[in-house]
Amino acid sequence: MSYPGSAYIKAICRALECRPQAVYIIDCPLCPEDEQGQMELDPQTKTYWCADCGRDGTLQSLLAIAEGLFVSRHRESMELMERRPRVERGGTRR
Ligand SMILES: [Zn+2]
């Protein structure tokens, strides 16, 4: 299934929980945190490019990266949610 480039960008931004700052420029999720550059997203060519870390590729692959980051960022709260039923059942165990 193929989406228009702008749909990828929306999905990427949703996963990264950010809004595009300019037209399609976001804080680069691939740069080191202390020197985060600006990543350009191009809906026409469906590619991304960061001048700071030099990474580029397709929006589709960036979406996979963004979703992976989303999962790792929320893993802790997801694990808590998974653990909750066990806590109720287990009672005093801690
Ligand atoms: Zn970068």
Image (spheres, rainbow, N blue to C red):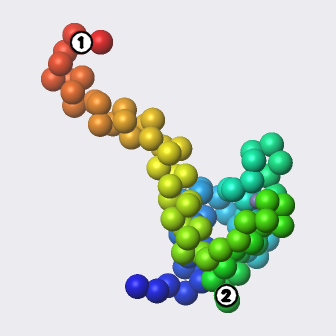
Task: Tell me the quarter of the image containing the C terminus.
Answer: top left
Question: Which residue position holds label 2?
Answer: 45
Identify the residue at horizontal 73%, vertical 59% (top origin). Answer: 28
Q: Is residue 71 above or below residue 18?
A: above
Identify the residue at horizontal 17%, vertical 19% (top origin). Answer: 90
- Give percent across and percent down for residue 75: 44, 41
Q: Is residue 44 above or below residue 89?
A: below
Q: Which secondary structure, mark 1?
A: loop
Q: Is residue 10 visible to the viewer in this orientation of the structure?
A: no
Where's ligand 1: which quadrant? bottom right
Identify the residue at horizontal 84%, vertical 61% (top origin). Answer: 52
Residues at marks 1 and 2, CA–CA distance in whole angstroms = 55 Å
Task: Name the amino acid, label 2.
Answer: Thr
Q: Is residue 74 above or below residue 84?
A: below
Question: Which residue position holds label 1?
Answer: 93
Task: Name the amino acid, label 1.
Answer: Arg
Toward the left, the furthest residue is: 89
